Amino acid sequence: MNYIIGVDGGGTKTEAVAYDLEGNKISEGKAGYGNLLINEKQAIANIIQAIEQCITPIDKGSCHYICLGLAGYGGVENPQGIKRALSRAFNAPFTIVNDGIIAHAALLKGNDGILTISGTGSVSIGIHKGIEKSAGGWGHILGDEGSGYWIAMQAFIKMTKEEDEGYEYSHLTETILKKLGYHSVMQLKKFIYSATKSEIAAFVPLIVQHAEKGDGFSQDILNQAGYHLSKQTLEVIKKLKLSENVTIAIKGSILTNIPLVQSSFINHIKLEKLNVKFVLDDVSATLGCYYIAMKQLK
């Protein structure tokens, strides 16, 4: 059996999936994080482990290509370590790209269009006639507007305003303090300046719950998130000089799982009167590796 392997290496896990040459899933393997910026040696070991797990169940198969989409790959100063390790471990040609590129290919089936991602962070990636442009993806210090981190931080900032201006704590503030085990907003710095981005973004479900119960501030945050993500997407459309027949796909828990953010995003895009097709499917990013690999093989 001839097959290709797609690898999605993120900040918490690595997923490797084998596809036959028609795009059907054959087997899979999973391991720890694949982001080389966390710990290159361990990330490489995890990537190889996931691929080996994926290959093991395939009887007498021939791997024609390996495509890897790795989080943070664009920030790797010297990629020779991962390239040497893959060359030693597997007798197959390979391509390594950023994980956003394989997600783009997966949702758009290898075709031109724009992918906007909003999870803990946010980014928009557009490809048109071989030209790639992006907006966002600057990280939580420089940007990430509309991301899970950004949404949660708007609530935390409001908490500090309530404290400074002597207002009675809102119900949202009380709920967040209860989850943290705190009695006062004055204790908040202990958490904010020691927490990871993911730990901060984990407070988004509380904000969503309050929005669903009619809390105006929470609703406004989520609407603003959709607006910021639409603005980011429109910047990519502008950079690519697209004016009609634009395909926009979405990915990430914020855009796919929070209706208020998604509807705000779509509505703000529609205000521009573009001929837009939205792709709201939920597919594995490794499928994008299949489309990229098949282009290389052809």
Image: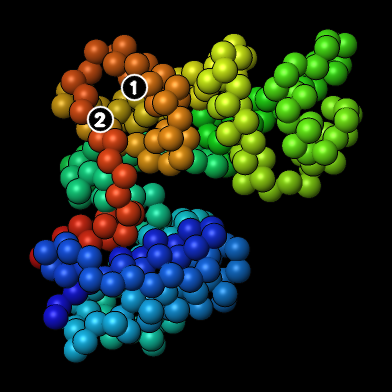
Visible residue check, residue 156: yes
Quadrant housing residue 4: bottom left
Q: Of 97 and 2, which appears nearest the observer?
A: 2
Q: What residue appears at the point 34 percent right and 16 percent down from the top-left corner?
A: 267
Residue 224 horizontal/vertical position (percent): 52, 19
Tell me which label, 2 or 1, sits earlier in the chain.
Answer: 1
Provide the secondary structure element on which disc 2 rests: strand
- Where disc 1 sits, the SS reads helix
- The N terminus sits in image quarter: bottom left
**For the point 53% across and 34% down, which residue is it?**
147
Residue depicted at x 38% and y 21%: 263
Left or right of 288? Residue 195 is: right
Rendered location of residue 101, percent (x, y) = 34, 51
Is residue 79 placed above or below 175 in the rendered structure?
Answer: below
Within 10 Å of disc 2 (Cα), the crowding (few <14, some 14-19, many 20+) is few
Could you tell whether 256 is left or right of 154 in the image?
A: left
- Image quarter of residue 54: bottom left
Kindly identify which numbered label has been placed on residue 242.
none
**Tag 2 near tag 1, CB within 8 Å:** yes
* Amino acid tagged 2: Phe
Vertical relation: 89 (above or below) 138 = below
| Residue 132 seen | no
The front one of 23 and 243 is: 23
The quadrant where residue 216 appears? top right
Where is residue 100 shown, x and y percent of the image? Answer: 39, 49
Quick check: 163 left or right of 220? right
Q: Which residue is mark 1?
A: 266
Residue bearing mark 2: 278
Residue type, numbered disc 1: Ile
